[in-house]
Amino acid sequence: MPKTLGKVRPHLTQNEPLLFEQSSAGKKGYQLPELDVPAVDAATALGAENVRAEIAGFPEVSEVEVIRHFTRLSTWNYGIDLGLFPLGSCTMKYNPRINEVVARMKGLAWAHPYQPEELSQGAMEVVALLEKYLAEIFGMDAVTLQPAAGAHGEYTGIMLVRAYLEAQGNPRKKVLVPDSAHGTNPATAVIAGYEVTTLKSNEQGMIDPAVLAAAVDENVAAMMITNPNTVGVFEENIVKIAGILHEKGAQVYMDGANLNALVGLARPGDFGIDVLHSNLHKTFSTPHGGGGPGAGAVGVMSHLEPYLPGPRLKAVDGRWSWDYDRPKSIGRVRAFYGNFGVLVRALAYIMAHGGPGLRNATIDALLNANYIRARLEQHYQIAYEARSMHECVFSDACQERKGVRTGDIAKRLIDYGFHPYTVSFPLIVPGALMIEPTETEPKSELDAFCDALIAISKEIDEDPEMVKHAPHMTRTSRVDEVTAARKPKVRWTGE
Ligand SMILES: *Cc1c(COP(=O)(O)O)cnc(C)c1O
């Protein structure tokens, strides 16, 4: 694959110079008319300490150069609107544009949280409807939409558990977390004041009921379970597991960040979960990945409802009102009522699909993941034999024999024009390749992705060194990630 075209630099490429390199002294991006008022000396008017003659090294460029520079850079940004985004445990689905249209409707987009209740009935109805639909999808009794993200939902959920147990006289000491859990789970438990006990998964990648039974005692406040877990496998003993925990008075927390495998097919409330969070910015199609706002809705069974963050919606004479009189509440976890724009998108997504549509989306997500698994299984080692749900996890065991690891394969995938999958997670799978296509991908896109990974596995057989030094087609080849993280160079020094 040639990288250059002889000596000529291609016109539109990833080889865009830095803005600093395009600078020429004295160039300006603006032009002002002659002054028609008396000139004022800036230093006299503002104080000399507030006036700077020039910013050393600041690029001097014209307007069109600035516009083209940033427009070109924006085309390097790989996003879901450009192609498959196979990150596992992320649910990077395409976000239907209708959600954006609805979220931008003036009455919703311009609503202010300090608006009086009588002018906020529509916005309050959005919150009420979304709480109702999510309670139905989760199979739970009540939902709060306040938490701003998944980890924040976890924190809220475990604080609810703590408040509930405290009301019974003892908050207990420990939270159990399987070794396949997302890193936010143990972090949440610690922030909520608990010690973490890690449970080892069995050879099927699942929680072993016998190991669990031995670990549960009266000191255990809760277990945090992800289902399907992070190896993409459904915990088939979940009812038994919930029973073991409940018998000892412990609560069952579910990390439902990615609910893409369950919506419309199975309800956590029906298989023994007491409290769960779900990322509306994953399954319910709010754009994410750029650190933008999210929402970590938390669902609870009725015994935890009194502890939910306040205020809560209540209907008074056919109108919505906020109820602040919640004596057992853990209190607010966020200003106002949650990330409202995200809630609007989630509601639009749910209503546009309807019940049968949501269920079909789930079935397609499962089908797509299993299609990828079926096509790649002869080329990459599947981590666990158990059937995959919405994502599939491989290991680099076959490629490692040639000295090529999952990170190298991911870099080579960039040369083929794809965003990499999730690399080296979950930690219980050495050299993991974690792939979640979601339901929004057409077969042609899944095939192109599988073709690329199959081609890479052949390249590894023939020329492992080439793959170990990928990517070859990008502006920057492999960067020193360790130095970049440890000694970041964040200031332009002119070299
Ligand atoms: C994404 C994710 C989280 C964290 O969600 P944030 O919104 O990033 O805080 C927690 N658990 C699992 C399993 C996840 O995939």
Image (tube, grey):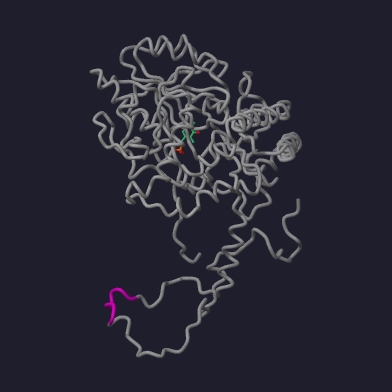
- Residue 33 in magenta? no
Instruction: Judge whether residue 46 is colored magenta.
Output: yes
Coordinates of residue 126 in the picture (x, y in percent): 45, 41
For this view, does 140 lie left or right of residue 394? left
Left or right for 264, reference 257: right
Residue 387: name its quadrant.
top right
Q: Name the residue located 75 percent from the left edge and 35 percent from the top edge.
A: 458
Decide: is 357 above or below 414.
above
Q: Residue at x 59, y 53 (%)?
A: 77
Depth check: give the residue in front, 461 or 9. Answer: 9
Please provide percent x and percent y for residue 112.
37, 52
Q: Is residue 95 above or below residue 429?
A: below
Count all numbered tags in the image, as a single digit: 0
Residue 390: image x %, image y %? 60, 29
Magenta residue span: 45-51
Displayed quadrant of residue 15: bottom right
- Main SS of the magenta segment? helix
State whether residue 210 appears in this view: yes
Q: Residue at x 43, y 45 (%)?
A: 122
Q: Is residue 156 left or right of residue 448?
A: left
Residue 305 sits above or below residue 17 on the image = above
